[in-house]
Amino acid sequence: MICDYDGTLAPIVVRPEEAVPEPGAPEALAALLAGGRHRAAVVTGRRSAEASAFLNVPELQVVGLHGMEWPGETLHPPDTAALQVIKAALPHAAGMRLEEKGWTLAVHYREVPEPEQPALEAALARITPPPGWEVIAGKKVREFRPSGHGKGRAALQLAARFPDHLPVFLGDDVTDEEAFAALRERGGVTIKVGEGQTEAQHRVASPAEVVTLLRTWA
């Protein structure tokens, strides 16, 4: 059972540091793991330590930074020169906030006045990432990250580690679509949380329904 964090195990909020888990989500994940039949993991754009602290399920595997950060593995040094180039190219807008994760940079604009958001999105789209970097779109966020990672690759790696288990992926955002596509090709189960077009086969309405699903599965 592979879950995104924001929008899946926790409601979307204006400020990422306030994204506490949906009531019952940590307990549902712990119940899955305690039964012995299931494996569970979180794949998130956050640093893994941050998501782990929110959930507080010690035995839960958390993969951070869109698949760059794996438990027990050492991250390569961040490309600070590329990050400086990206920051220098960013437009300025009231309400825009930068979330610097060391290895990646997220530009949040949920607090930018709504009439100004399309122009800001267009300005962000005109930025050419440095060589070896890419920009991905999320809900009211654009994230700059090194190329060659992503939730699709992470989901496939997790599925390969447990070849006798059925891989299930739950996510809500644009960044989860690559995982949906990857696991569908492998015969997995894919579940979209919330509204919007999706590659997923199934849908639930909210993080509260995710908790219900996890509890039922456990």
Image: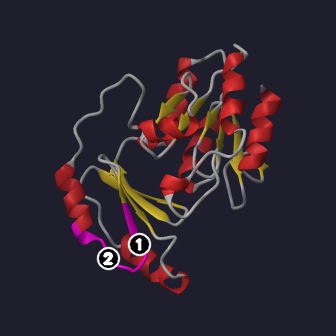
The image quarter containing residue 73 is top left
In the image, is 137 to the left or to the right of 212?
A: left
**Magenta stretch secondary structure, dominant:** loop
Number of dots carrying numbers: 2
Question: The disc labelled 2 sits on which kind of residue?
Answer: Pro
* Quadrant for the N terminus in the image: top right
Question: The disc labelled 1 sits on which kind of residue?
Answer: Met
- Whether residue 13 is visible to the viewer of this picture, yes or no, is yes
Q: Residues within 10 Å of mark 1 (few under 14, many from 20)?
A: some
Q: Residue 96 — which label?
A: 1
Closer to the camera in the image, 201 or 38: 38
Tag 1's secondary structure? loop
Tag 2's secondary structure? loop
Any magenta on residue 190? no
Q: Residue furthest bottom?
A: 115
Any magenta on residue 96? yes
Q: Does 165 sit above or below residue 96?
A: above
Contact between marks 1 and 2 (CB within 8 A): the answer is yes
On the image, the x and y values in percent for residue 56 come to 56, 32
Q: Does 18 sit above or below residue 90?
A: above
Task: Please report the bounds of the magenta region as a residue range.
Answer: 88-98
- What residue would you read off at disc 2? 91
Q: Residues within 10 Å of mark 2 (few under 14, many from 20)?
A: few
* Quadrant for the C terminus in the image: top right
In the image, is 127 to the left or to the right of 5?
A: left
